[in-house]
């Protein structure tokens, strides 16, 4: 009898395993979506995650899944999850992990890995690679879990590392053997951690707030610069109050467009080259003084040569204390999370804050109105063939009519012109190539944006840019996502006019197949493919795409001579004295 009951107990003992503990740990922390690509050893993990009610979005290439995870992290403040197989899958996911870290997007790349014993002795296992060592220098933190009872801690550490302080990419290495480890279910349950306060507020010091306010108060020509950190922080109402109560003109960085509507009276975007050198006090809110801001010095900022500092003083709000003084002196560092810093500033501003001198505001308005009038005249033209301006005039109207739509944007000219022509009206609606100016984010970002928000997505893509992730149109069709891809097809990288100077049979390195029909790629998977050669055709196709929510790809043929080398950053191409 005694023996029997022992047997019965053993038989009824509830077990769990590594697979289920990973899923339980993610779900416990409110993570409901995985972007990935199945294969050994994580195929069953994708199946079980789906069975457990998670959304599992399978891609055609891990780089796109990883980009999707990164931008989901930016949009939600929860780490986006990318799941890949070992070595090659892991490496495919790594570019986007590094890009996420560079851009301060929180994500976790989870990769299965091969047998530790074999990998460490380099005995040639299936997909052998020391993934942890490779990931470490490319992300914010990297962890490996060897025992099922440590999965809870591993996932908790990964979540905290991704979202606390300056957000970034985290690598979590899960060896194949871990998934199959079975342990007592109750022991497993008790080992999981629901992370409390994963991104704790970081309250700024009061004296730092006062220092910033003093500088701002005495400024004659103040300027606020909003960066994607400000968009990420989701302190939208307070940021708007700060701008409006102080009356200070502001400039949005690319992904901060729409934090306040681009049509806001205080936007100085159309007078950028006037306000940067002209301002005497500049307050950076979640924006780094990196190459995108000419390192805070040189002629852009009124310096007398490319290296010289301008005359302005800087206030910088950032969660990372090390960011201060990275390029030029920061006179008033304000270290803390943007929500807490902005609300502390608002409290100090009170109701009797004097607006900036009229002389400064009037000068900006004059410059801005002149530039806007010039732009309106250019947009009104209707050349044949279509060019960037006449095509983007359509996109501009479509976004105006659908301000909740998300705009994904990559390319060189296709990027620069879209950024300056298409106004955004709401926060976190513009997703683009970010700090690195990386090509290949297009379809990964589009899939994630549609999955996370449920809103229509419009991807404005250079034909080269699209090629980096183009196969994911199948993914867009498979999940029936409301994504409208518009390819600005000018037959090449930057433009389609280069010729092979040797007269040989190869085309020039920047040139593609002329007259390519990208729309047929969408037809192949059952979506709507449209070939558009005029603004009217483009408008009709975009309107239909947004209202039908059907996966759509518009091959928008534009003048192949229209682009310039590298768009607006042509000066970054090295030039030697020798004749080309
Ligand atoms: P942009 O490219 O738009 O200029 P950057 O990526 O250069 O923006 O800068 C974003 C900055 O925002 C980073 O320095 C990052 O540390 C900071 N940041 C991100 N999230 C927060 C936050 N919640 N609070 C404060 N700073 C933040
Ligand atoms: N590879 C990666 C990963 N990122 C890059 N930024 C580049 C290459 C170089 N590059 C740019 O910076 S823009 C661009 C490349 C290849 C494509 C430009 O051509 P396009 O856009 O067709 O996408 P336009 O409108 O013709 O300029």
Image (cartoon, rainbow, N blue to C red):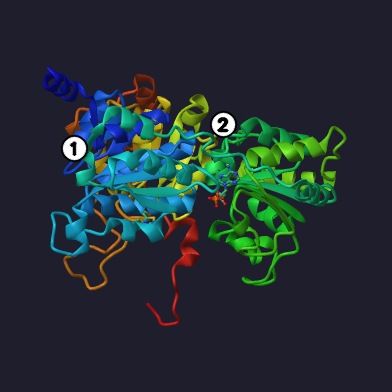
Quarter of the picture holding the C terminus: bottom left
Q: Which circle marks residue 425 in the picture?
A: 2
Instruction: Determine the residue located farthest toward the bottom in the rendered image.
Output: 578
Label 1 C-beta lies within 8 Å of the nearest ligand 2 atom = no
Front residue of 226 and 147: 147
Q: In this view, does 573 lie above or below 444?
A: below
Q: In this view, does 555 lie above or below 91?
A: above
Would you say 281 lies left or right of 116 here?
right
SS for dot 2: loop
Instruction: Determine the residue located farthest toward the front in the rendered image.
Output: 2
**Residue at x-position 20% and y-position 45%:** 177
Circle 1 crowding by C-alpha within 10 Å: few under 14, some 14–19, many from 20: some
What distance separates the C-alpha of mark 2 from that of mark 1? 41 Å
SS for dot 1: helix
Front residue of 297 and 110: 110
Q: Where is residue 288 in the image (x, y as percent from the top left)?
A: 59, 54
Q: Where is residue 532 in the image (x, y as percent from the top left)?
A: 32, 35
Would you say 34 lies left or right of 208 here?
left
Circle 2 crowding by C-alpha within 10 Å: few under 14, some 14–19, many from 20: many
Q: Earlier in the sequence, mark 2 or mark 1?
A: 1
Q: Quadrant of ligand 2?
A: bottom left
**Residue at x-position 38% and y-position 52%:** 142
How many marks can you see? 2
Q: Which circle marks residue 43 in the picture?
A: 1
Q: Can residue 458 be seen in this view?
A: yes
Q: Can residue 475 be seen in this view?
A: no
Q: Where is residue 414 in the image (x, y as percent from the top left)?
A: 42, 47
**Residue at x-position 27% and y-position 39%:** 36
Would you say 85 lies left or right of 135 here?
left
Q: Where is residue 74 in the image (x, y as percent from the top left)?
A: 47, 39
Would you say 427 lies left or right of 434 here?
right
């Amino acid at each position: 009898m005694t023996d029997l009951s022992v047997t019965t107990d053993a038989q009824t003992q509830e077990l769990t395993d590594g697979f289920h503990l990973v899923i339980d740990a993610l779900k416990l922390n409110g993570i409901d979506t995985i972007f990935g690509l199945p294969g050994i050893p994580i195929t069953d993990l994708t199946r079980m995650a789906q069975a457990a009610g998670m959304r599992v979005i399978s891609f055609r290439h891990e780089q796109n899944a990883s980009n999707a995870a990164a931008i989901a992290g930016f949009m939600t403040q929860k780490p986006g999850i990318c799941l890949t197989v070992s070595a090659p899958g892991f490496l495919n996911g790594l570019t986007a992990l590094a890009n996420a870290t560079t851009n301060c997007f929180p994500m976790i790349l989870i990769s299965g890995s091969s047998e530790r014993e074999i990998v460490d002795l380099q005995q040639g296992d299936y997909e052998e690679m020391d993934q942890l060592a490779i990931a470490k220098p490319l992300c914010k933190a990297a962890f490996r879990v060897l025992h099922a009872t440590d999965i809870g801690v591993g996932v908790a550490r990964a979540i905290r590392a991704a979202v606390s302080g300056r957000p970034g990419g985290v690598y979590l290495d899960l060896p194949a053997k871990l998934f199959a480890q079975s342990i007592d279910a109750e022991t497993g349950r008790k080992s999981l951690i629901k992370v409390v306060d994963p991104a704790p507020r970081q309250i700024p010091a009061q004296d730092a707030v006062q220092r910033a306010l003093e500088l701002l108060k005495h400024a004659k020509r103040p300027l606020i610069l909003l960066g994607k950190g400000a968009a990420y922080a989701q302190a939208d109402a307070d940021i708007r109050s700060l701008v409006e109560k102080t009356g200070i003109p502001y400039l949005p960085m690319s992904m901060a467009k729409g934090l306040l509507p681009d049509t806001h009276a205080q936007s100085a975007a159309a007078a950028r080259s006037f306000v940067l050198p002209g301002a005497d006090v500049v307050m950076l809110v979640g924006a780094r003084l990196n190459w995108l801001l000419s390192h805070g010095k040189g002629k852009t900022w009124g310096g007398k040569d490319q290296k010289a500092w301008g005359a302005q003083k800087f206030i910088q709000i950032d969660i990372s204390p090390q960011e201060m003084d990275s390029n030029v002196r920061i006179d008033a560092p304000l270290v803390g999370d943007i929500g807490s810093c902005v609300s502390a500033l608002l409290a100090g501003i009170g109701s009797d804050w004097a607006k900036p001198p009229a002389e400064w505001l009037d000068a900006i308005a004059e410059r801005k109105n002149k530039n806007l009038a010039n732009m309106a005249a250019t947009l009104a033209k209707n050349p044949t063939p279509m060019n960037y301006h006449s095509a983007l005039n359509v996109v501009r109207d479509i976004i105006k009519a659908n301000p909740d739509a998300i705009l994904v944007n990559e390319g060189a000219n296709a990027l620069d012109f879209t950024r300056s022509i298409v106004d955004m009206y709401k926060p976190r609606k513009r997703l683009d190539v970010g700090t690195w100016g990386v090509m290949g984010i297009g379809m990964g970002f589009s899939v994630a944006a549609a999955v996370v928000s449920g809103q229509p997505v419009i991807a404005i893509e250079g034909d080269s840019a699209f090629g980096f992730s183009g196969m994911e149109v199948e993914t867009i069709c498979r999940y029936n996502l409301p994504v409208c891809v518009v390819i600005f097809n000018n037959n090449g990288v930057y433009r389609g006019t280069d010729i092979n100077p040797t007269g040989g049979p190869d085309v020039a390195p920047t040139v593609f197949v002329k007259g390519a029909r990208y729309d047929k790629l969408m037809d192949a998977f059952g979506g709507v493919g449209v070939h558009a050669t005029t603004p009217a055709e483009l408008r009709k196709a975009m309107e239909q795409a947004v209202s039908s929510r059907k996966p759509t790809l518009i091959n928008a043929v534009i003048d192949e001579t229209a682009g310039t080398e590298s768009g607006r950053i042509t000066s970054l191409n090295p030039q030697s004295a020798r004749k080309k």
